[in-house]
Amino acid sequence: MDGHQSKALTRREVRATRFAVAAFVIGGILALILAAGRHMPIGGPESLGSLAGWITGGLSAIAYAGAYLLPGGGASAPALRWRLEVPLAKRIFDVLALTVAMGMLNYLLVMAIAAVFQMGFRGLLIDPIGGAVLVGFAAAALTYVAALAGGNVTGSSIASLAIAVLLSGTIASMVSSPDESWWQLHFSQLGNTGGVTGYRFNLALIITGFVITVIAGYVGQAFTSGVRRRGYDLGRKPQVLAWLFTGIGLCMAMVGFVPDAVSFAIHVGSASGMVVLFGVFAYCALRYIPDLPRDLIVFTAIVVIGIIVAIVLWVPIGYYNLTGMELVAAGLLFAWLLVFVRSAEAYGAGGAVDGAGGAAEVARAAGAEPRDAG
């Protein structure tokens, strides 16, 4: 680690600590004011956990955006200089998408932890001062994590954020659904449910879709950089691949915007478009991008075959229902997303990316020393 990297790391830690201290103070004060002298349960609709979730989500989102945008923050990293060429409107959209995603993730995390503690401490009511301290601690802890994330943004960290938001939003909707038989239909049934269940599920789809459009830029840049380093001229093919990747995210967002109870045709068409675009993107990437790691090619083939098998097990075999097929397919797709983005970062860094050396290069390029691909 050279002097510049050491200073950057120290700056991120100091800034994250300051954000955390501020979040503890602000979160505690807000909780004290909003509690209005009430003794509140840990979890539930009108609870300390609900209060903590909103406060923590908001403060951690602000910290993430601040750590990214402030001088010397994540946006100033040498690996992200290419983003200066991205249109300003797109850069603003990307920051908003990532900020909202981080806020939603931490909101759901606090709500989940509060619900678990509520089951363990039934009947317990927290006084206003004690509640303010607990809210302050929750806000400080997750604001610290968010600030560190905002100070070191990479394609793989964004992919992890997208997966975490969709997973947490789906689980939150599952456990809060008043319809115990939703799984007998499909996951989209969660989005048809009224109240907080449908809201969380659809919002998770929308935000995840938007975050995937952010990842598209990092993937496109990684391919562009990797191809240039290897002396190839592919014209605009890397940019076309980035647009295909963007299309996947937009289709996912549309699935959330239009539940199938609102428009079955648009909802199913968007979901189908997402799968088709994934297939086209995977084929084009493997077909036109030279020197991709062999492990990635094999893993992509395994994922495609796995999805086909999952569909066959649903129809015509009938081993499980549509929900089971969706669960398997989604798990495979998001595993592929994380591996693919990490591999693209390694490819953009220009190192060897096959075999055991490929695994080490992927880990290095996606970790503390990203270059060019960001």
Image (cartoon, rainbow, N blue to C red):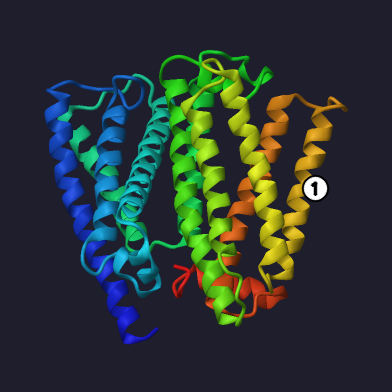
**Residue 129 visible within the image:** no
**Residue 16 visible within the image:** yes
Foreground: 195 or 256?
256
Q: Secondary structure at mark 1?
A: helix
Image point (37%, 38%), residue name: 104
Estimate the x, y position of residue 135 in percent, counting from the top left: 24, 38
Q: Is residue 59 above or below residue 324?
A: below
Estimate the x, y position of residue 40 in percent, counting from the top left: 25, 22
Estimate the x, y position of residue 242 in percent, counting from the top left: 54, 56
Q: Is residue 337 above or below residue 118?
A: below
Give the mark count.
1
The residue most toward the bottom is: 2
The residue most toward the front is: 235
Image point (71%, 30%), residue name: 324
**Residue at label 1?**
305
Q: Is residue 360 above or below residue 74?
A: below
